[in-house]
Image: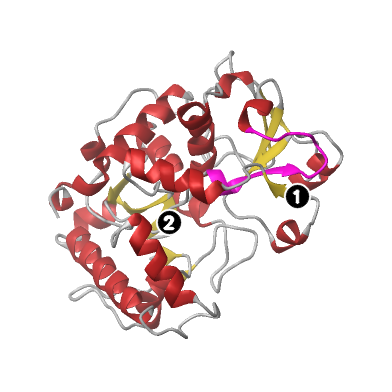
Amino acid sequence: MALSHYDRHAPLIEGAVSVPGFPLEVLVVAQSEAAGKHGNHRHERMLNNEEFDIAEVSLSSYLMAKDQGAPFTAIPVFPRRLFSMSQMWVHRGSGIAAPKDLSGGRVGLNTFQTTLSVLAKADLGRAYQVAWRDITWVTARDETRPFRQDASVKLERLSPGESLVEAIMAGRLDAIMIPHPSHAFLQNSQLVRLLKDPIADEVRYFKKFGYFPIMHIVAFRDEVLKNSPGLAQAVFEAFQRSSQIASERWEDPNWSVLAWGRQAIEKQQKVLGDDIWPNGLEKNMANLTWFIEQSHDQGLISRVYRPEELFHPSVLEV
């Protein structure tokens, strides 16, 4: 099973949580260029090469793979979530001060189908009345899964060897929207968040729509599920136990390097509630339904799926 090394996965990676009845090796495989212990490019290695039995993958790319008939089935475990507002960046001297200023502009993405990309495009319209089709989207990487580009979509690729940071610093991009800025990106004093107070916007978003948006999902190769009855539910339960242990560790005020980490958790709970990371289909139905609709609107899948179509039958009611 290939996972990123998040706090909620640490008990699984350490062996503090196992999957009774199923000998399961947990591999630390990153998605970003900064490799984990067992390498990187986890999504491509799973969804294109079937290299793992189970893996944390992009919700967007999983949905596309499923739509294209690839042999994968998921469980309703969602290891990564992000709001889009804090991931929108501009050049300090660009004069772009609000999302409406991006209409008619050029915005850089890792890929068009990256889950954060799909969310950010949709959120521009949902939260700021900016139509994503009025923007030219410029991607930096190869797409994980192929798709047929709609003629109405303005989609370009960066010049070979050019990075998103180089393009925005040279004025060839008006903004960048990516899920995992590099260390060098974050240290660049000329790159600032588009929104003056993205956290306030994200709190409003949460209170209006009721969820912290899903980025990743846990997918299985169909052959593995066929040959291992009970595995889907056993792995779901293991993730639940791992998350509970991780949550309890945050009760220690010195669990992380954050001087006020415990207070930050308490503040978050007061504002957003105690459970913004729910697993299971029922609690995530609104999020999944809307994301599927947006994926279809952006031309990434052929039809609007019902959320339950994405998951193994044994875990639809857990």
| Residue 4 image offset from top left, x and y in percent | 47, 65
| Residue 292 image offset from top left, x and y in percent | 36, 32
Q: Can residue 276 be seen in this view?
A: no
The quarter of the image holding the N terminus is bottom left
Please indicate whether residue 187 sits to the left or right of residue 242 in the image. Answer: right
| Foreground: disc 2 or disc 1 | 1
Amino acid, disc 2: Arg
The quarter of the image holding the C terminus is bottom left
| Residue 176 image offset from top left, x and y in percent | 68, 41
Q: How crowded is mark 1: few (under 14 residues within 10 Å), some or many (20 or more)?
A: many
Q: Distance between the residues labelled 2 and 1?
A: 24 Å
Q: Which residue lies furthest to the right in this view?
A: 170
Q: Nearer the viewer, residue 21 or 31?
A: 31
Task: Residue at 87% x, 39% y: name it.
Answer: 170
Label 2 belongs to which residue? 80
Please indicate whether residue 115 sits to the left or right of residue 102 in the image. Answer: left
Q: Give the range drawn in magenta.
A: 85-98
Please indicate whether residue 38 sits to the left or right of residue 212 in the image. Answer: right
Query: Of marks 2 and 1, which one's residue comes earlier in the chain?
Result: 2
Label 1 belongs to which residue? 191
Query: Vertical placement of 111 versus 22: above or below?
Result: above
Q: Nearer the viewer, residue 312 or 97?
A: 97
Q: In which quarter of the image is residue 51?
A: bottom left
Q: Which of 178 and 18 is in front in this view?
A: 178
Amino acid, disc 1: Leu
Q: Residues within 10 Å of mark 2 (few under 14, many from 20)?
A: some
| Residue 290 image offset from top left, x and y in percent | 34, 33
Query: Vertical placement of 227 versus 309: above or below?
Result: below
Q: In which quarter of the image is residue 52?
A: bottom left
